[in-house]
Image (cartoon, rainbow, N blue to C red):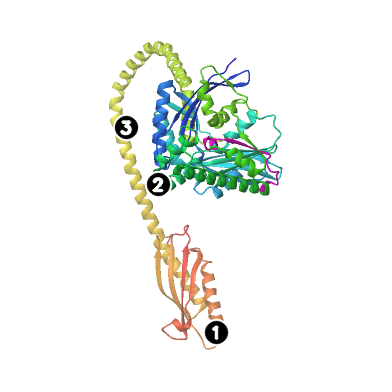
Amino acid sequence: MSSPKTLIINCGASHVSAAMFTQNSGDLVLEDFVIEELDYDYSIDEEWLDSLMVALRNICHSHKLSGAASLIAPGYQLLTKTIKVPHVDDAKRPQIIAFEAQQNIPYPLTDVVWDNQVIADDGVETEVILIAVKSDVINGFCKEISHTGLTPQAIPAASILDYNSYLLNYQDSQEDTLIVNIGARSSNLIFCNEDGFFIRNIALGGNSLTQNLADSLGKKFSEAEKVKVAYFSGQTSYEADHPSVQILQTNAENFQKRMNQEITRSIVNFRRQHGAKAPTRILLTGRGSLLPDLPDFLRQHQKMEVEYFDPLKNVHVGSKVEEELLADSRISLGEVIGEAARQVLPEPVSINLLPATLAEEMRFAKQRPIIIVAAVLLALATIPPILGFRSTASQYEAATRAIEGKAAPLQNTHRQILSNQDETKKLRDDITNLEDLVNSRSNWIIFFTDLQQRLQDVQDVWLESLELNRVNGNRLDMTGRILITNTEDDQDVSKRVNSLLESFTESDFIVEVDDVILVPASNDPIGEHIREFKFTLIANPERPL
């Protein structure tokens, strides 16, 4: 029995394709497939999205596509990082990964949409792949997609999907394999072995060859792209002595050499970082891999088997799919098959870059029909009670009108009572303030008497100023002076001042002495036998001044 259809859109740098899949008894079935080239100057990044939307609208219109779809984000738009974190419990792992993501992604996490996938765990360290895209890029992408009638239900990253496709189609293989996907703007290298996989993205793709041809032929990028495709696909041929032939072949050889160097560098790094064996074969995919002689060149220099990746090896193809179209596009199907394979693989890899706000909107959209039905049923359920209560309500209304007629004279009396209550409260507050003032006056007299007694106990000391600060609490900022005898030194003077201040804290009116300053003799203008000191008394709120 076949399952519901799944629509997958691959938004590549040079083409866009739409594929419809179902499952039949656990097998993946490609029911329909269409592909359209993007018409823009590949060297101008800003033109990609507009060209993609034009081609996608054409596909949706001609094939009547709409609704939920998985939209594969191109690898060149993504930031891919592989990190290692300490092995911890699964519950704690997200926090560790989020911390490391902030250290490794060169933007604040609030400015990107990112996801992660564990790719290996040896019990000591966990190897994780991080993939991120800037929020403004993915939000703008989703906004444009919504105008086509499609609803993004997931945005998988193209970088890792070839691994799913490999698991589906080469599940019985025991060889350590390197998948090389050569795209238009970048290439993905995926190392596959029994421990998992490792990804490296390099900024070398078919556009690099086009740009070199444009520089060598003195043509625009778009013109050089047409020459490249026509010549290397066999659509156009030149005489052996034609000047363009040497340029084309030389640039193709240079591209092959650069690709071979990047593969060698990646293999060396992979073996050094993972202590793994070198792969024993290379599987080529992506349109850039169709360059003539590339498999033989890599086979000769890498000393290993090189062949093309077959993404349809274990995939059934429906009758609606055109055989010729499928044959021409087979090399571009790895990522699409990899996304569809998540439906049938027991442990697929998955990166979803769908913004959280859109994911929440989709979740609500799925629940909306249920909510609407529930609301309608709830509304209908209220009709019988409403009809039953209507007659009772009319009786209550008549009784209410009678009561209101009797209550009108009483309302004026009630308002007068409330007014009197407000006036009474104001008078009570005024009386309280007057009582506080009277108490404060008597407290000041008692406080000064107590203060004078304590000054006399210390002898040869007097106060010169007192300032009450009520803004910061009841604080008394005071200045005093003390007379120094010929037999006293600074230490003796300090003891006498401290003795005086400590005695202040014994007063019922004072809770603390603060900000004590004994002015040095050299700074006192009166003379060397008189010293000034400053301090603050914190008043007791229970004995207000």
Q: Which residues are magenta?
A: 273-290
Q: CA distance from mark 2 to mark 1?
A: 97 Å
Q: Position of residue 328 (x, y in %)?
A: 51, 27
Reply yes or no: does residue 279 show up in magenta: yes
Residue placed most toward the observer, 247 or 221: 247
Question: In the rendered image of this protein, does residue 183 appear above or below residue 526?
Answer: above
The amino acid sitting under disc 3 is His
Question: Disc 3 designates what residue?
Answer: 414
Q: Residue at x 43, y 61 (%)?
A: 474
Q: Position of residue 470 (x, y in %)?
A: 40, 61
Q: CA distance from mark 1 to mark 3?
A: 77 Å
Is residue 349 visible in the rendered image? The answer is no
Of the two numbered discs 1 and 3 in the rendering, the one whose residue sits closer to the viewer: 1
Question: How many numbered badges does the structure rendering display?
Answer: 3
Q: Position of residue 399 (x, y in %)?
A: 34, 16
Quadrant hosting residue 280: top right
Of the two numbered discs 2 and 1 in the rendering, the one whose residue sits closer to the viewer: 2
Q: Residue at x 40, y 70 (%)?
A: 466
Question: Disc 2 designates what residue?
Answer: 218
